[in-house]
Image: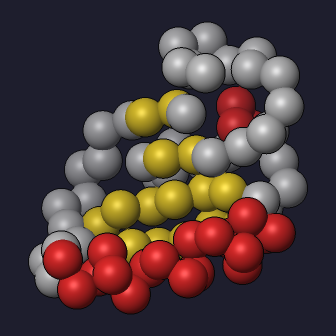
C-alpha cells in the first residue's frame, strides 16, 4: 500500500483494480461514509501500476510484486 499526504482536506482518493472495487470496496463504502461523514471518498478503478498513478491518490491497493520505492507490502 502506498500512502501519501493529501492537501485536499476532507477527501480520500483510493485507487484499485476495477474487479476489487466492485467486489469489495463498493460493498463497504456505505459503512465508511456513515462513520466518517466529513470525508468524501473518490474511487479511481484502474489497471495500472501504483508508481504510474497521479499524485492525487492517497491510498493505492493492488496485487502483484511490489516495485514502488517506499511502498509497504
Tell me where residue 58 appears, x and y as whole percent.
43, 48
In this rendering, the count of numbered labels is 0
Q: Is residue 60 above or below residue 26?
A: above
Which corner quadrant of the image does residue 37 belong to? bottom left
The foreground one among 55 and 1 is 1
Q: Which residue is depicted at the point 61% across and 12% down?
A: 69
Please determine whether, in this image, residue 55 is positioned above or below residue 33. above
Query: Residue at (83%, 48%) from the top-left corner?
Result: 48
Where is 21 relative to 61, above or below? below
Q: Give coordinates of residue 7: x percent, y percent.
A: 25, 50
Q: Percent from the top left, x then y, of residue 10?
A: 19, 68
Kindly tell me whether residue 40 is visible in this rendering: no
From the image, which quarter does the C terminus lie in? top right
Q: Residue at x 55, y 33 (%)?
A: 1
Q: Quadrant of residue 63?
A: top right
The residue sitting at 47% across, 77% down in the picture is: 28
Q: Nearer the viewer, residue 9 or 40?
A: 40
Q: Is residue 53 visible?
A: yes
Image side of residue 19 versus residue 23, left or right: right
Judging from the image, the colouring scheme is secondary structure
Q: Position of residue 38 (x, y in %)?
A: 14, 77
Amino acid at each position: 500500500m502506498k500512502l501519501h499526504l493529501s492537501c485536499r482536506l476532507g477527501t480520500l482518493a483510493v485507487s484499485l483494480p476495477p474487479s476489487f472495487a466492485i467486489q469489495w470496496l463498493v460493498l463497504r463504502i456505505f459503512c465508511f461514509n456513515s462513520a466518517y461523514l466529513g470525508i468524501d471518498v473518490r474511487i479511481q478503478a484502474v489497471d495500472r501500476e501504483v508508481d504510474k498513478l497521479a499524485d492525487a491518490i492517497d491510498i493505492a491497493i493492488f496485487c502483484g510484486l511490489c516495485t514502488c520505492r517506499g511502498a509497504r507490502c
